[in-house]
Image (cartoon, rainbow, N blue to C red):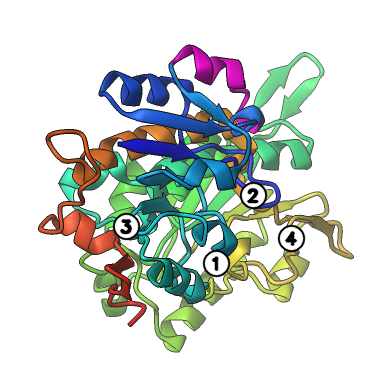
Amino acid sequence: MKIAVLNEPAAGELRVAATPDAVKHYVGAGHTVSVVKGAGKGANFSDEDYKAEGAAIAATNESAVKSADIVLSITGGTKALVAKMKKGAGLTGLLNPTDQPDFAEACAKRGVTAYALEYIPRISRAQAMDVLSSQSNLAGYRSVVEAGSVYGRAFPMMMTAAGTIAPAKVFVMGAGVAGLQAIATARRLGAVTTATDVRPAAKEQVASLGAKFIAVENEEFKEAETAGGYAKQMSKEYQKLQAELTATHIAKQDIVITTALIPGRPAPKLVDKAMIKSMKPGSVLVDLAIERGGNVEGAKPGKVVETANGVKIVGYLNWPARMAADSSSLFARNLRNFLPLVTAEDGSYAPDWDDEIIQGCALTRDGEVVHERLK
């Protein structure tokens, strides 16, 4: 099988879909790997690192994909690049299909099979392929590190001869993968940590990390989780009750980190201007959902905004890319675990269409858009 690894064309994307270790694995399995020049630079992997593991270095993305059986990428590249691929080839990445269905249509038109890795089913067998979890985990960690930098004060209680420094109070809104890692990181740094989520299972998870759980625990709360483990869209009534509870809590916090995302929908607004106005000068809000509209009113994509009352709102984009080396390594390992599902026993490219994982993440097949969410 001929594998091509893209130099990601998206602005600010520093990750790469295959590390030198991954290339070593592919070459050892008998595959031919072509890595585009400079693909790993943002993650501190040089072209020489790839060559040392047996990869050929392609001059451009276009030349790399021309003869590839499968193209490995972070975001899928561009429609123009898809047009250069050969018919019947595969393309992997976080393709964001609900926001850009025209990309899937371009793949279908070219006869390319597009695999949206964010649609890999959340089943036990697919855990090692779950790119959303691996990337969100690092985003949650980084959110606390960045919050500490912007906050500019200590996290733990410090008792010194010169006096005592009170611990920072950190509130994490959303206890999915990113939120749980944010809680764990804040706790490790010594902050007094609280968290909230609409999913009942999150209460025990939050408590296991040593944080206090904050939520309106009514009947709707008890049924607020989908079979796939995602949070359901809550009613207006519940949102109002939860907002009232969290508003009083937020006023006492030094750092608030919001992580609430609903697949395929705009991010819910969790923190409004009134809540922000109640916070102390120097407090920090970190919005991890900014790429889907954000959880915090007034957050600006890619910027740190300071409000009139001295609260800073952090709206950085692409959090995993802020730790490009580690996020690339995890992403590459996820892909290594996925590729056997599109590889025949003789090493050729051959998707197993009977596999539920392939069925769950394939957007296109034989020139048609086949995924239920895009039909």
Q: Amino acid at mark 2?
A: Pro
- The residue labelled by disc 3 is 88
Residue 48 falls within the magenta-colored stretch: yes
The disc at residue 279 is 4
Determine the residue positioned at 72% across, 51% down. 284
Determine the residue positioned at 20% across, 45% down. 341
Residue 102 falls within the magenta-colored stretch: no
The disc at residue 208 is none
Q: Residues within 10 Å of mark 3 (few under 14, many from 20)?
A: some
Q: Residues within 10 Å of mark 1 (few under 14, many from 20)?
A: many
Q: Which residues are magenta?
A: 42-53
Q: Tell me if residue 182 can be seen.
A: no
- The residue labelled by disc 1 is 246
Cα–Cα gap, marks 4 and 1: 12 Å
Earlier in the chain: of badge 2 and badge 1, it is: 2
Which image quadrant is residue 336 in? top left
How many marks overall? 4
Q: Is residue 209 left or right of residue 296?
A: left
Residue depth check, mark 3 versus mark 4: number of the one nearer the observer = 3
Cα–Cα gap, marks 3 and 1: 51 Å
Q: Secondary structure at mark 1?
A: helix
Q: Amino acid at mark 4?
A: Met
Which image quadrant is residue 79 in? bottom right
- The residue labelled by disc 2 is 9
Q: Residues within 10 Å of mark 2 (few under 14, many from 20)?
A: some
